[in-house]
Image: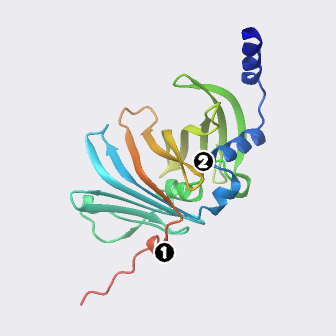
Amino acid sequence: AFAALAFVGEAHAAKTWTIDELVERNVEAHGGMAALRAMKSLRLVGKLLVNNGQYELAYVRTFARPAMVRTEVTQQGLTQTQAFDGVTGWQINPFQGRKDPERMSADDIKAMAEAASEFDGPLIDWAAKSMTLAYLGTEDVDGTLAHKIKLARGNGDVEYVWLDPDLFLEIRTLSQRIENGVQQAIETDIGEYEKVGGVMITFSLNSSRKGSMDKQQVVIEKAEINAAVEPALFAFPVLKAKA
């Protein structure tokens, strides 16, 4: 009996997966397409740990469809804001002595635009987002033989996604994009999934530039789906005329 069970396990591990099968499992793992489509907004509240945990900042990130995102980090009464309304990206950075909103360059908003359109998962609706996918087999991720998928975006940027072989949820991504003429590679370890409103949401993100020891960790303490979110939250602020 044990030999038979072992054989079944090996057969499952040796199964040849197609991209469509892996994406289908991934969609199911996230809660299914109906639940994902019903998610019109997502607000994440927690903390951001930088310099390997030496500094802690309050963290709020809000997403809304079709492709809007706003991130706020606060420390000692100062709040840095970055937002993207689907077209324009802007920021307010008081940590650098800037109190007025500034528009961001096309390169600087790449990561935000990707996050905004993919907050339900990088593989969801991939074809509609002008992406191409390729399955690269399995690869070891900290002791887990994960499914590795190459995701090529319409703008030429590439992301690699590793799926847990049992849960079919993302456990690591590697984003490669050109910013200001320089190739940037950001590796993110993903974990601590919890189901919120029928959708699997990650509560832990550990990111670093490829090869760097300086990690940045986001720890989510609360996730809220379909909170009332006004489009004005993401729009470039209209400055009041000074008297």
Q: Dividing the image into 4 quarters, which one contains the N terminus?
A: top right
Q: Position of residue 161 (x, y in %)?
A: 61, 39
- Asked which quadrant contains residue 97, the reply is bottom left
Q: Amino acid at mark 1?
A: Glu
The label shown at residue 230 is 1
**Distance of mark 2 from mark 1, alpha carbons?**
31 Å
Looking at the rendered structure, which numbered label has been put on residue 172? none
Amino acid type, residue under disc 2 in the picture: Asp
Which residue is at a point 37% across and 32% down the rendered structure image?
213
Task: Measuring from the top left, give residue 37's x and y in whole percent.
Answer: 66, 60
Please state which of residues 146 and 159 is positioned toward the viewer in this rendering: 146
Q: Residue furthest bottom?
A: 243
Question: How far across and how far down the image is residue 100, in percent?
Answer: 31, 72
Classify residue 210 as left or right of residue 199. Answer: left
Q: Position of residue 3 (x, y in %)?
A: 74, 9
Query: Which of these two is toward me, 122 or 40?
Result: 40
- Number of disc labels: 2
The image shows residue 165, relative to residue 156, as above or below, that is: above
138 vs 155, nearest the viewer: 138
Quadrant in which the C terminus appears: bottom left
Q: Point out the frontmost of discs 2 and 1.
A: 1
Q: Which mark is residue 157?
A: 2
- Describe the element under mark 1 as helix, strand or loop: loop
**Residue at image coords 39%, 33%:** 212
**Compared to 115, does 209 lie above or below?**
above
